[in-house]
Amino acid sequence: MAKFKLVISDPKTGKTRSVEIEGARAVPLLGKRIGEVVDGSIADLPKVKLQITGGTDKDGFPMRWDVHGGVKTRIVISEGPGFHPKRKGERRRKTVRGDTITEDILQVNMKVVEGEI
């Protein structure tokens, strides 16, 4: 069964809340992609809309919006999630996860778009 740790942040107040969900409560998140908006009732937050902003898998590899699907792959990147260059123009091949939530994802990062936590 799927088990996720949701890290929900509210940009207006600066507060962050962590919620663990599993089983039937976690099923609505499977197949969702980065950028999609979901209902907050899955995290016991009624009247709140949450946008998926990213996450990490069970091995700690970050999700990226530009890798489609739920695959783990090695890509050449120069910035963004998964790589912070030490020199200007530096590029490296790094392992990252795709933008779709699968059962391999452990942590899902979200932000509040409507309502308040």
Image: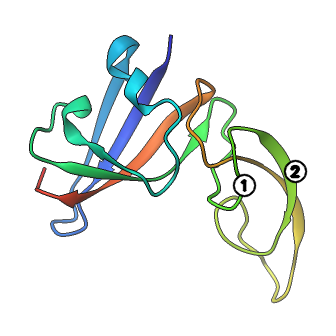
Residue at point 69%, 47% (across, down): 98
How far is mark 2 from mark 1, CA to CA?
10 Å
Which residue carries the number 2 mark?
74
Where is residue 53 shown, x and y percent of the image? 45, 56
Secondary structure, mark 2, is strand
Indicate which disc, 2 or 1, sits on the residue closer to the N terminus: 1
Residue density around tag 1, few if under 14, some if 14–19, many if 20 or more, within 10 Å: some
Residue type pointed to by label 2: Arg
Q: Which residue is mark 1?
A: 67
Percent position of residue 77, x then y: 81, 68
Element on which disc 1 rests? loop
Residue 25 image offset from top left, x and y in percent: 32, 19
**Is 2 on the left or on the right of 51, as rendered?**
right
In the picture shown, does residue 88 fall above or below 100? below
The residue depicted at 58 percent of the width and 23 percent of the height is 103
Which amino acid lies under the numbered mark 1 shown in the image of this protein? Val
